Image (spheres, rainbow, N blue to C red):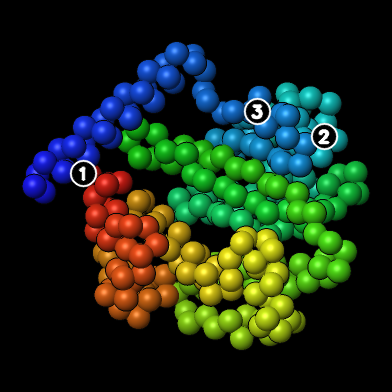
């Protein structure tokens, strides 16, 4: 029975890959989807190469940076496009994704643009891999955050909390401690995270740990026990239980699926 299920699953995966391959061959150019994002004014879209240079952007990014057209951005790095500390921080963030392959999901950021405008946004970045599994670039979006005026004062504190979570996943993280770091009550922190991500504070912590684990399982040769510790789990058994509950596969099954070799 197990062999038949495995064979059926492999056949489905093969068929799905064939459909994708035929479609991409018919497109005749990289599928960046920048034309789609050109029509979305509250989302910045970009693709960068392994050196952090823009190779695809949407019109919103052109407008936000005060350029005349996309050609004014292509081939440039974030430090050449954005002023001061913002360009340095974006470049640092890009380098981290390009080096360790860890994606960024829903990072809360304050952007200061060349025209003096500032605004909060949520940023996502994903590494782009070639056929051999090497990182050759990254793609990303930043979505404008239209927070009510009574919530904007909390965003700086939330930014600090989110950054702390993602840089200290290997440590115990308690909601009460995070709330104090944000200058909020635990209840208010929970409310703000639900408004941003649709998740409670506890659920956000679990998602951050599981997403980090998925990235490590896909892109590194670290043992599952080591990944469990890296992501804040006391032992491999607890990690496996939570991973299976969240993803539907055990860590070893997920690793074999993404790294069959």
Q: Is residue 48 left or right of residue 24?
A: right
- Cα separation, mark 3 vs mark 2, equals 16 Å
Where does label 3 land, which residue?
36
Residue sitting at x 33%, y 57%? 248
Residue nearest the viewer, comparing 248 with 72: 248
Residue 117 picture location, percent across and down: 89, 49
Residue 17 versus residue 255 in the image, above or below: above
- Lower position in the chain sequence, tag 3 or tag 1: 3
Residue 155 versus residue 217 in the image, above or below: below
Where does label 2 land, which residue?
63
Residue 218 picture location, percent across and down: 35, 51
Residue sitting at x 90%, y 44%? 115
**What is the residue that sits farthest to the front in this orientation?**
1
Q: Is residue 25 left or right of residue 248?
A: right
Residue 1 picture location, percent across and down: 8, 47
Residue sitting at x 71%, y 78%? 188
- Lower position in the chain sequence, tag 3 or tag 2: 3
Q: Is residue 3 left or right of residue 242?
A: left
Q: Secondary structure at mark 2?
A: helix
Asked if marks 1 and 2 touch (Cβ < 8 Å), the reply is: no
Quadrant holding the C terminus: top left
Q: Secondary structure at mark 3?
A: helix
Where does label 1 land, which residue?
261
């Amino acid at each position: 029975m197990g062999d038949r299920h495995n064979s059926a699953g492999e056949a489905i995966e093969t068929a799905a890959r064939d459909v994708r391959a035929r479609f991409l061959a018919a497109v005749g150019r990289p599928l960046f989807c920048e034309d789609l994002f050109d029509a979305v004014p509250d989302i910045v879209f970009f693709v960068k190469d392994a050196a952090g240079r823009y190779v695809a952007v949407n019109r919103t990014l052109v407008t936000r940076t005060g350029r005349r057209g996309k050609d004014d951005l292509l081939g440039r790095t974030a430090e050449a496009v954005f002023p001061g500390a913002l360009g340095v921080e974006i470049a640092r963030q890009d380098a981290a994704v390009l080096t360790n392959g860890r994606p960024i999901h829903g990072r809360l950021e304050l952007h200061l643009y060349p025209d003096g405008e500032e605004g909060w946004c949520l940023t996502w970045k994903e590494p782009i891999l070639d056929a051999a599994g090497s990182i050759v670039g990254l793609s990303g979006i930043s979505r404008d955050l239209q927070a009510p005026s009574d919530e904007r004062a909390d965003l700086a504190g939330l930014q600090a909390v989110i950054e702390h979570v993602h840089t200290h996943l290997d440590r115990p993280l308690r909601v009460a401690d995070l709330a104090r770091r944000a200058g909020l009550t635990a209840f208010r922190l929970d409310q703000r995270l639900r408004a941003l991500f649709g998740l409670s504070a506890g659920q956000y912590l679990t998602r951050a740990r599981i997403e980090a684990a998925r990235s490590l399982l896909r892109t590194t040769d670290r043992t599952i026990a080591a990944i469990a510790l890296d992501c804040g789990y006391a032992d491999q058994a607890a990690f496996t239980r939570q991973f299976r509950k969240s993803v539907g596969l055990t860590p070893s099954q997920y690793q074999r699926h993404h790294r069959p070799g």
